[in-house]
Amino acid sequence: MTEIDPVPLAQLTTLRTGGAPERMLEARTTSELVDALRQVWSRGDEWFVLGGGSNLFVGDEEFEGTVIRVLTSGIERLSSPHPGRSRVRVQAGHDWDALVAYTVEQGLAGIEAMSGIPGTVGAAPVQNIGAYGQEIQETLVEVDLIDEATGAVSTVPASDLGLGFRTSVLKHHYGDVPARRAVILSVTLDLADVGDAGRIVRGEQLRRALGLQSDAPVPLAWVRERILATRTAKGMLLDPEDPDTYSAGSFFQNAIVPDRVAMTLPPECPRWPVTPDLDAVTVIPLGAFDGQLPPIASVRSDVKVSAAWLIEQAGISKGFRLPRSRAGVSTKHALALTNRGNATAGELAQLARYIQSRVHAEFGLVLQPEPVLVGVEL
Ligand SMILES: Cc1cc2nc3c(=O)[nH]c(=O)nc-3n(C[C@H](O)[C@H](O)[C@H](O)COP(=O)(O)OP(=O)(O)OC[C@H]3O[C@@H](n4cnc5c(N)ncnc54)[C@H](O)[C@@H]3O)c2cc1C
């Protein structure tokens, strides 16, 4: 572990905001990362770990605490207990897209639709990253992590991480502390070994994004190329030349609302059903079964509605800026708030609040931010 002169977080985050923290450490190996965290925790410092800084919105004031940069890397290939599959164990600081490129090259399928998502592998389960219908929870087996409460390192199965739509027990949601304060050290994925032949693409969302008509298998490299091109067109692939990518990706989450609320929205508003919790099973012990089945409890069905649509219908078009502000909505995607050049966190927060108030006034819904907010309020 190395202590370095603190670098302004505006240089290390893709939204390009934030001053220098009080203290900054770099960890290049897992044992350095573990040592750094234990040291910071024993001092009782405020802290957070920084991966690629692509899901963080940091305030303008100095962060009074320690930022630990996760710079570990490395991919280990392991066998899978399932025939026709292979596993990879990847260090937390490894670049996510470099991992996707590696798996595609190796003919391993399962994360190719998430090509081009910025950031590190260790941060990927934190918000259960996903794109075009594919999410990391579909292939995630387990993570090695260290808990702040005990200082202990353990292997935790994916099923214990509370993974859901852009969430997990590790994520700092706006206005909330995470259910589990822990840092991921490595991630293990279980992938299908499909080789050069590729595979049939099944998900409707992905098929649409790829423009697929037939059921013929397609090579993984082709899927990756198409996804990267689509992301470039939407400003969702980091490019130092393109200010539309000086963002944290989607700034607001798609709103999840009960279906009775969704029914009040105009029919053109894009929406997707949220799968009900099918784990809620009623078990009747055989001895207590009197031949009568209890009535089926109604399952509340939620609906996910498009935040981009709500924003545009509330009168905020792509490229929108408040007067004299250096923050603006991306010219390619209504969900991305961007830094058009030296915007402060204050300017970005003002734009975010304005959008929230317009959507609330129009539709009665409060959009929630997707990035993790540090030292800034909406
Ligand atoms: C242009 C653009 C496009 C994007 N597209 C998508 C997309 O399609 N889908 C999607 O899901 N996301 C997307 N994102 C968001 C972002 O890329 C992901 O959330 C990514 O996983 C963040 O990784 P990071 O390393 O940059 O995390 P950071 O921003 O560095 O950190 C995010 C949070 O995770 C915590 N964290 C970081 N590393 C660890 C660790 N090892 N253990 C525990 N906590 C950790 C941090 O403390 C912080 O709270 C996009 C962002 C941008 C800028």
Image (cartoon, rainbow, N blue to C red):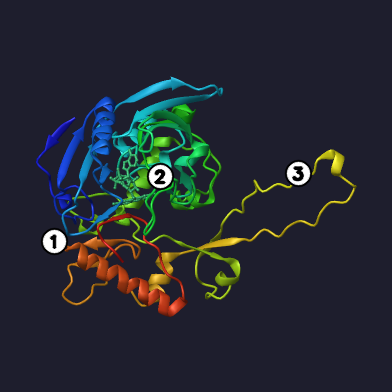
Mark 1 lies on residue: 342
Q: Position of residue 107 (x, y in %)?
A: 42, 28
Left or right, residue 25 beside residue 188: left
Disc 2 within 8 angstroms of ligand 1 (CB):
yes
Quarter holding the C terminus is: bottom left
- Given residues 262 and 60, the one toward you in this image is 60
Nearest the eye: 10 or 225: 10
* Left or right, residue 17 beside residue 143: left
Horizontal placement of 174 versus 9: left or right?
A: right
Q: Secondary structure at mark 1?
A: loop
Q: Nearer the viewer, residue 274 or 330?
A: 274
> In the drawing, does residue 293 fall left or right of residue 111?
right
Toward the bottom, the furthest residue is: 361
Residue type, numbered disc 1: Asn
Residue at screen point 41% across, 66% down: 367
- C-alpha gap between disc 2 and disc 1: 31 Å
State the residue at coordinates (18%, 55%): 18
Q: Amino acid at mark 2?
A: Leu
Q: Closer to us: mark 2 or mark 1?
A: 2
On the question of residue 169 being in view, the answer is yes
Q: Secondary structure at mark 2?
A: loop
Q: Earlier in the sequence, mark 1 or mark 3?
A: 3
Crowd rating for badge 2 (residues with CA inside 10 Å; few <14, some 14–19, many 20+)? many
List the residue tagged with mark 3. 283
Q: CA distance from mark 3 to mark 2?
A: 31 Å
Q: Residue at x 31, y 61 (%)?
A: 336
Q: Is residue 5 above or below residue 251?
A: above
